[in-house]
Image (cartoon, coloured by chain):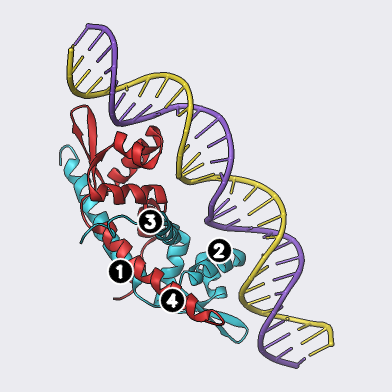
Chain colours: A red, B cyan, C purple, D yellow
Amino acid sequence: MAPVGSLPSPELLQAYSRFFRLLSEPARLQLLCLLRQEPMDVAALIAVTGFSQSHLSRQLTQLEQAGLLRGERQGARTLWRADGTLVDDLCALVQVRLRQRLEAQLQELPSS
Amino acid sequence: MAPVGSLPSPELLQAYSRFFRLLSEPARLQLLCLLRQEPMDVAALIAVTGFSQSHLSRQLTQLEQAGLLRGERQGARTLWRADGTLVDDLCALVQVRLRQRLEAQLQELPSS
DNA sequence: CCAATTTATGCGTGTATGCTCATAACAGCA
DNA sequence: TGCTGTTATGAGCATACACGCATAAATTGG
């Protein structure tokens, strides 16, 4: 594949960066992975992650605005779900690179 | 594609996050895109980006440790190159999502 | 319509880090 | 071996933001 559209404009670079920043926090990535398994409400997320309600509220809102989550009101509470394979695909690509790096480091070790 | 390996361990989540964090800064992403086009030395990168030498040195080192860049000493100076399509692939995936979001926002606008 | 539960938000704090300047370590060349 | 140009590193500053607490706003059930 060729370089990213020859050279992304500063605006596009910023857009990419903002998106990647969402994934650059373990907390948010965890939320995405959890909600990928099964939809949950905030009470359940608090139970699982231990985060405060206010923190979760903000993170979930951010992820929803990016289109990575969808929150549908289910009576009183809101049920959050993550559909689409984008994050999975991204992680799969990165995982390959992580493995390569570890293997490279292994090679560079003196004795075996 | 199925969810990310059922549920990534905290360590794996951190590894993913650290990687995405590298891409979460426009400066670094710009470096990757520039060096994807053609290898450059630091002097050229200073000229193009306007960043300080110390800053570039640190960023380049970070990206090299992640395996996203390779710096080969060319006599006195070091020539930096970015090979591999990982970043391109990641950006391509994200770009689709960005487009989707903008289209969605367009739909939600009141009158046209 | 009121009380209870859920979600959103203002505020403060601590930490991480982007970025610069100054300087040290270092490589190549006279 | 000094001298010059290149890269790495220590220190400091400014800012972003993750996260919690307290509280307001909103929605639902009685």
Can you tell which mark lies on residue A103?
A: 4
Identify the chain of the residue marked 4, using the numbered disc in the image.
A
Labels 2, 4: one chain: no
Q: Which residue is mark 3?
A: B9
| Residue at the (47%, 61%) spot, across then down | B27
Can you tell which mark lies on residue B89?
A: 1
Element type where label 2 sits in the image: loop
Q: Where does residue B4 sit, x and y in percent of width and height?
A: 28, 59
Labels 4, 1: one chain: no
**Residue type of the residue flagged with mark 1:** Asp
Q: Quadrant of residue A19?
A: bottom left
Identify the chain of the residue marked 1, using the numbered disc in the image.
B
Label 4, label 1: how far apart the Cα atoms are: 22 Å
Label 2, label 1: how far apart the Cα atoms are: 26 Å
**Residue type of the residue flagged with mark 3:** Ser
Q: Nearer the viewer, mark 4 or mark 1?
A: 4
**Residue type of the residue flagged with mark 2:** Phe
Identify the chain of the residue marked 2, using the numbered disc in the image.
B
Residue B90 lies, with reference to residue A79, above or below; the image says below
